[in-house]
Amino acid sequence: MMRKGIGVTIVRSGEIYSPLPLGKKDLFLAGGKIVAIADDIEPPHGIDVTMIDARDRFVVPGLIDLHVHILGGGGEDGPASRVPEIQLSTLTRAGTTAAVGVLGTDGVTRSPEALLAKARALHEEGISAYIYTGSYHLPSMTITGSVERDIALIDQVMGVKLAISDHRGSQPTTQELARLAAQVRVGAMLGGKKGIVHLHVGSGKRGITPILDVLDATELPIDLFLPTHMARTQALLDEGIEFVRRGGNIDLTAHSDKREMVAAIEKLIREDVDLAHVTLSSDGNGSMPVFDERKNLVGMKTGSVTTLFRSLGAIVSRGL
């Protein structure tokens, strides 16, 4: 029997996407869960009900952002450039209800243990939160002593993070990247997970060639790898198109300039790319350093998690 305090809300007459379009429906929410989606839901008697009029509005699932610096990014310009931890409200106001935390350049003053603690804190506050172990560098920083054990034994660990084709990375060899990917593969099998080698792809001339070299030299499956920032340049996006055609997945970073994101999606559609193999993420709360042609730092900004929602809105408005 329902009692007062259970937190009942009815969202009335919104255009529902789940994510497929369901038309205009009501949503019945109780205890933090969606209990029903139907026409003209009657409020239950005897309890307080919050009514939300969603006419002429879209009602969509919360966004999954699979690349967020929940612990804060930065550090490339010294200690004062470290970005603070993200707050729950920053994520929820951006429509994000599931986030995967990452480390970046700073694997010295930040750790996967702290990243895991932050993910657990966000989960306690009400959203889903996971992490990648490791950072830009090899050997990968871990919680249990190995990438394989982190993935197999810790529920929140989805895979490992590493940088390629970037002057801030460890410049991994084919053998090193293959060995790391093999650890992810086995750890994921033992832990009953997908397992992901999440690769920050920098602006270096090699692009995703390090991944292709591993695929050519080993029996590892292509969908083990998820390169991100794949719309950084047109050349890298072209590499991503071919990667998807081989059966791989790519992640695009939602740009602060919505026009660039729309242009990237339009190109994928023109090239008949299977968009089921393409994801968007924000790279939010991370630093956005600007380097000159000599790799000297000349500027620094902070990424926003709102770019994911804004880019998605621009894509939908374009009719894509």
Image (cartoon, grey):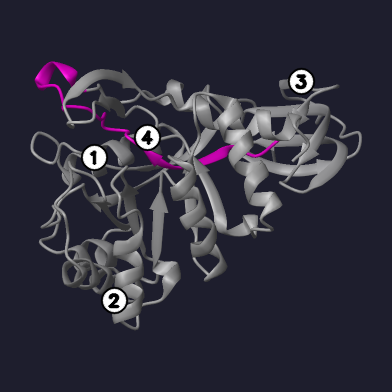
On residue 186, the disc is: 2
Q: Please tell me whether mark 1 sits on a helix, a strand or a loop.
A: loop
Q: Residue 130 in the image: x percent, y percent? A: 37, 47
Look at 18% across and 43% down and name the residue there.
167
Distance CA(mark 4)–CA(mark 3): 27 Å
Q: Please tell me whether mark 2 sits on a helix, a strand or a loop.
A: helix
Distance CA(mark 4)–CA(mark 2): 28 Å
Q: Is residue 109 magenta?
A: no
Q: Residue 6 in the image: x percent, y percent? A: 61, 31
Distance CA(mark 4)–CA(mark 1): 19 Å
Q: Which residues are magenta?
A: 60-82
Q: Is residue 63 magenta?
A: yes
On residue 51, the disc is: 3
Q: Nearer the viewer, residue 127 or 244?
A: 244
Q: How many marks?
A: 4
Relative placement, left or right, of 58 versus 82 is: right
Q: Residue 199 in the image: x percent, y percent? A: 32, 53
- Above or below, 220 against 201 in this view is below
For label 4, the residue is 122
Residue type for callout 2? Val
Distance CA(mark 3)–CA(mark 1): 43 Å
Look at 27% across and 59% down and name the residue there.
154
The quadrant of the rendering that contains the C terminus is: top right
For label 1, the residue is 104
Q: Earlier in the sequence, mark 3 or mark 1?
A: 3
Look at 69% across and 50% down and name the residue there.
269
Disc number lying in front (4 or 3) = 4
Residue with the most extreme bottom position: 219
